[in-house]
């Protein structure tokens, strides 16, 4: 399996709390991505990063924010969690240049009550 | 914008049978990749097979092969001699080539839940 990690794996939290989902990879990949996977299992890109100090919004609008201060670390933050944020969040990374494969983490399943 | 459609929400076959999962896509791009990813229950998403759009030859990886029809924008996955470990969600995905500096984002289909029965 790929060297990309996500913590926590499961999180149940109350409305209004601030949460940070962690994602780290030890492969030295330049590009990193966050996907939201809804209960119907479809995945949508919500954030991506080309490299350090680079972040962009994805195809699906999200109230979350991300940062990329270090190459290996790409955390996602929700300032005030709501039940509508309940979903699975998958982090992925890939080497830049001509490589094509994205490597996925195990995901964080978030439930906001 | 690109779209990917998987019209089979669920499929079920017996072990050792052959199964084909369908995928169609829509794009105006000429240079792109297509992928099949597998997401086993409670496990990480992994790449099964890829196809470069400029290649006419269909990709093959052991028991997995694709039927790539560029003009029809169709990209089906065939699993031969299916095994219990093939039980998973399968996602078809599109990536615009976009050059080496591009975002190289994946656009996923809705997924097909495949169950292999003993």
Image (cartoon, grey):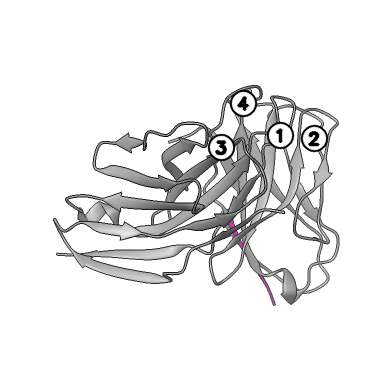
Residue furthest out toward the front = B71
Residue of label 3: A102
Q: What SS does tag 2 mark? A: loop
Q: Using the image, name the chain to which the residue with label 3 belongs.
A: A
Disc on the earlier residue, 2 or 1: 2
Q: How many marks?
A: 4
Q: Using the image, name the chain to which the residue with label 4 belongs.
A: A
Residue of label 4: A95
Disc on the earlier residue, 2 or 3: 2
Q: Residue B58, image x and y in percent?
A: 36, 38
Of A48 and B36, nearer the camera is B36
Distance Cα–Cα, label 2 vs label 1 = 6 Å
Mark 3 nearby-residue class (10 Å; few <14, some 14–19, many ≥20):
many
Membership of A111 in magenta stretch: yes
Q: Using the image, name the chain to which the residue with label 1 belongs.
A: A
Residue of label 1: A73
Seen at 53% across and 34% down, the residue is A101
Foreground: disc 2 or disc 3: 3
Label 2 close to label 1 by CB (< 8 Å): yes
Q: Using the image, name the chain to which the residue with label 2 belongs.
A: A
Residue of label 2: A68
Of A22 and B17, nearer the camera is B17
Q: Residue A5, image x and y in percent?
A: 57, 40
Seen at 82% across and 60% down, the residue is A18
Mark 4 nearby-residue class (10 Å; few <14, some 14–19, many ≥20):
some
Q: What SS does tag 4 mark? A: loop
Q: Main structural element of the magenta stretch: helix, strand or loop?
A: strand
Disc on the earlier residue, 3 or 4: 4
Seen at 36% across and 45% down, the residue is B66
């Amino acid at each position: 399996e790929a060297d990309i990690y996500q913590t926590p794996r499961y999180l149940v939290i109350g409305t209004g709390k601030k949460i940070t989902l962690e994602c780290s990879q030890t492969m030295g990949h330049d590009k990193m991505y966050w996907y939201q996977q809804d209960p119907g299992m479809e995945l949508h890109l919500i954030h991506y990063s080309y490299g350090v100090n680079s972040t962009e919004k994805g195809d699906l609008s999200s109230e979350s924010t991300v940062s990329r201060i270090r190459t290996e670390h790409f955390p996602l933050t929700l300032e005030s969690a709501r039940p509508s944020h309940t979903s699975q969040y998958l982090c992925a990374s890939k080497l830049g240049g001509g490589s094509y494969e994205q490597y996925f983490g195990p995901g964080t399943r978030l439930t906001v009550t | 914008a690109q779209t990917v459609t998987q019209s089979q929400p669920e499929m079920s076959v017996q072990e050792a049978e052959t199964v084909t999962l369908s995928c169609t896509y829509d794009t105006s791009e000429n240079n792109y990749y297509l992928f099949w990813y597998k997401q086993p229950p409670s496990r990480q998403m992994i790449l099964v097979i890829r196809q470069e759009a400029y290649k006419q030859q269909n990709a093959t990886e052991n028991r997995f092969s694709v039927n790539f029809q560029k003009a029809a924008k169709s990209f089906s996955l065939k699993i031969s001699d299916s095994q219990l470990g093939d039980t998973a969600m399968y996602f078809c995905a599109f990536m615009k080539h976009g050059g080496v500096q591009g975002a190289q984002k994946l656009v996923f289909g809705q997924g097909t839940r495949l169950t292999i029965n003993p």
